[in-house]
Amino acid sequence: MPILLYSAPLVGVLVFGFALWARRVRVSKAGKWSKELRAEAVASGRWGAYLLGLAAVLAMVALAGPRWGSRVVETETKGLNLVIAVDISRSMLAEDANPSRLERAKREARRLIHDLDGDRIGLVAFAGQSHIMSPLTVDGSALNLLVDALQPDIASTGGSDLAKALRQGRELLLAKDEVADRVLVMFTDGEAHDSLTEITKAAERLRRDRIRLVLIAEGGTEPVRIPVRDIDGTFLGFQRDPSEREVATMRRDDILMAVADAAQGMLVAADVGDQAGAVRDLVAAFKRSPEATTTAAQDISRAWIPLLVAAVLLLLHTFTRRTTALAALVLSLGLSHPVSAQGPRNAADDAWLRGDFAGALAGYFQQVQEGEGGDTVLFNLGTAAMALGDSSLARSALAGAARSIEPDVRFRALFNLGLMELFLAESDSSNRVNHLEQARGYYREALLIRPSDTNAKWNLELTLELMPPESGSGGDDETPQPSSGESETQPATPQGLSVAQAEQILNSIAEEERQTHERLNRRRSQLRETRGKRDW
């Protein structure tokens, strides 16, 4: 800065003046003791004021930041291939998230772009159709501008077609080399207007192409209306369908879970406060490919040169003073006795090591009541209660530890919660499905913290294998299944009926089947007619 450069001589003169005044005061006080001491004071430190003044000038010059010259800089970065897909359908305007589903998704997408600086990131926006907003690039500033501009009005077709978005993200990722891992991150509420079969097929194609899918859920599970606002944000009413009925929208966890399972991907829940941070931690272990970049750097900063000279002058001034030996002595005395930071192990830990789980539980419980140890003691208390079979206390304590800001404590607490639910699923057969669902949720959240932990992956796979077929992620197959009381063979004609009576019964059955087929055909044609008219 020019003002610092211009003020450097003034600062140097001020420092020189103060140093010269301090020397004169020192000489004057020495003269009050004796003439010999005054002569010695005059002889020592003659150049101290000049050295300090010159050091001050050089320090101000360094602060001004002098720059000159140029050089070629070769850098090598390791990048990940990642595509962000954002749902911009009108259902994302629902305000059951703060301030809305779409605005929260855009905020988390911007944070993710900032956190993944150096990775190659693409952007896809989708509603009824999918559009590539940006190919893979390292220009985070341009991506943020595109994310800010995402609105439902830029979509050519309304509705939500998740299958097209998955295919578009796959094509964009496959256009890049396969040295680095490929990741598709999708922000959506899961309310799709295409069939679940098409969506799961597209998700399974991602799995076969080794593309990692991360779904980020937005919105709530309770039906809400979609507000319609003008360009200034003024409320105009609520979204209506072609029959002028108000539209209700909600987050479809069943679809999101089915897609995540089909792609063997991960689902970040809507109630996770830091969704971008969860994705960042998840992709931290993925493979990145090296990429060399050569740039010509102009006007290289040379502030270190005057700063180095100023430091040398200060050291020269310091080591020529008599106080240097005393300072070195004090430093040597202060560093000769290191302080041990290792405290004694408490009684609860000793009881745990002895296998006295009841004693350990009592000790940890007392520490929690006294407010000692924080989240670590909560984890120890929950683990001790788990070892003694007290599932209620274990669940409460481990749930508290799972909210810790320490990732290691949070992961271990979630892991033990999932393990306890697996044990309870074996012993409590009436609530087996609920326990397995809880265990799956805990292990999924734990893998967001440590994606490469093999034990958590193994237990999650075990949970999915133990899940009964009827509680799986399917559920959109509308083909009626025979109940336990039905038979797959037709009953024989009862004895005693005449031929005319039998024909009348068969004709009535045929007429009923014909009417049923007509109703189904009318329903299918209505669905086909209204399929392209949904714009939310």
Image: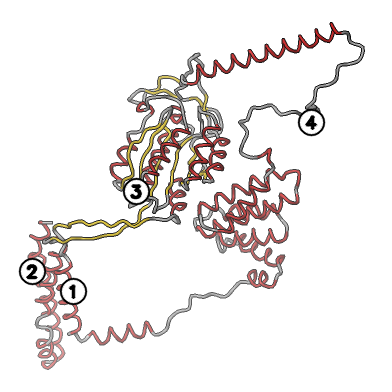
Quarter of the image where the N terminus is located: bottom left
- Which numbered tag is attached to residue 13? 2
Residue 43, percent from left and from top? 10, 88
- What residue is shown with label 1? 311
Q: Secondary structure at mark 2?
A: helix
Q: Circle 4 — which element?
A: loop
How far separated are the C-alphas under marks 4 and 1? Answer: 90 Å
Amino acid at the residue labelled 4: Ser
Q: Is residue 300 left or right of residue 228?
A: left
Asked whether the beta carbons under mark 1 and mark 2 sit within 8 Å of each other, the answer is no
Asked where in the image residue 22 lies, by quadrant, the reply is bottom left
Q: Earlier in the sequence, mark 2 or mark 4?
A: 2
Residue 254 picture location, percent across and down: 58, 36
Mark 2 vs mark 4: give the one in front.
Answer: 4
Distance between mark 3 and mark 2 Cα atoms:
53 Å
Q: Residue at x 86, y 8 (%)?
A: 499
Task: Point out the tag, 4 or 1, that comes first from the N-terminus.
Answer: 1
Q: From the viewer's perspective, is the residue at label 4 or at label 1 nearer?
A: 4
Q: Residue furthest top?
A: 500
Residue 120 - label: 3
Q: Which residue is label 4 attached to?
A: 484
